[in-house]
Amino acid sequence: MASEDGEVVRNKQVIFRDFVSGFPKETDMEVRESTTKLRLPEGSSGLLVKNLYLSCDPYMRTRMEKLDVPGYVDSFKPGSPITGNGVARVLESGHTNFKKGDLLWGFTGWEEYSIITAPETCFKIEHTDVPLSYYTGLLGMPGMTAYAGFFEVCSPKKGETVFISAASGAVGQLIGQFAKLFGCYVVGSAGSKEKVDLLKNKFRFDDAFNYKEEPDLDAALKRCLPEGIDIYFENVGGKMLDAVLLNMKLHGRIAVCGMISQYNLKQPEGVHNLMNLVLKRIRMEGFLVFDYYHLYPKFLEMVLPRIKEGKIVYVEDTAEGLENAPAALIGLFSGRNVGKQVVAVSHE
């Protein structure tokens, strides 16, 4: 397939219909077939790519509403394809950093073929001796989130106690493994017995609990971490954050990565135990991974050898085909996925 002749091909797309209030539904998106010409516009400095894998991430729920947050990603555009991180192959390049045939990960469209207008935000994939889908997770944005959040924001010390909520997800499973390799005591929470077993047996967490079976989260934390928590990696918010605040140690650190329990509420829940930040001199810091992308080479240096040695493992939940992408994304908010949710668009 040569792009020189501007061949016209089918282009299946996932279209965002309109802004969402409350819990999102599959019908907030529509799978449509259109056609596209396999050629970059004249003079374009962008990339024409074939999408291979797409990433479903909880933060994407925030983009389903009208956003006006400087320094954050834009809202989805009603009537246009969903956008997010993905893995793609370059079919034609107007940018000096990429050539035809290169593999990359970065922001792309939920469609078979996309034109990427900001190639400088994408990363060229140099290491292809691992599954390409890993660049939607372990070796992509979630992996960098775990690395930056744990090592840069939390400033861990060997022997500290670490608690992670939503611990079997794309980011949580990695923080736990990074913390274990660093010499910390690690506990996680998840929403099913299967996920708790995964945390203890596959990801080698020291302990874990199913929050849905715990009527008293404070008691659950005291049972698993009787001496308290040095580091909390926050993915959930709400009642979990309130319980954690009661169990933090002096000079504890909380890295706020996300708050999935709050995304679909029309009225977010309040947090009642914030005075503990003062009494225990806790540092609580929100962060966005984009601010740490300059550390990506350092991150790969640490993580690639450990994947090859089997010291870091990763679990993916793969949906096949763009037609199953809306259900895969919505499933994140009911905990249907086990591990990192990926959509396979093409296995080439």
Image (spheres, rainbow, N blue to C red):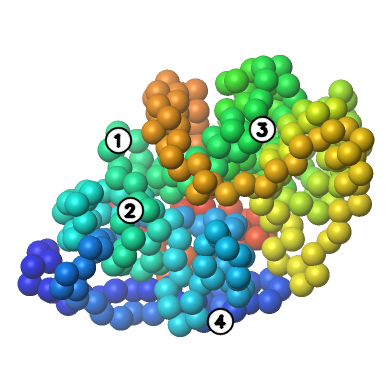
In the drawing, does residue 13 fall left or right of residue 285?
Answer: left
Q: Nearer the viewer, residue 87 or 25?
A: 87
Q: Residue furthest left?
A: 5
Can residue 201 be seen in this snapshot?
Answer: no
In the drawing, does residue 65 fall left or right of residue 268?
Answer: left
Q: Which residue is mark 4?
A: 18
Q: Which residue is mark 2?
A: 120
Q: Secondary structure at mark 1?
A: loop
Q: Position of residue 200 (x, y in %)?
A: 67, 29
Q: Which mark is residue 154?
A: 3
Q: For the residues marked 4 and 2, what is the alpha-carbon distance in whole angstroms?
A: 29 Å
From the image, state whether disc 2 or disc 1 is nearer to you.
2
From the image, state whether disc 3 or disc 1 is nearer to you.
3
Q: Position of residue 133 (x, y in %)?
A: 39, 46
Q: Are marks 4 and 2 in contact (CB under 8 Å)?
A: no
Q: Which residue is mark 1?
A: 127
Q: Earlier in the sequence, mark 3 or mark 4?
A: 4
Q: Position of residue 158 (x, y in %)?
A: 67, 17
Q: Which residue type does callout 2 highlight? A: Glu
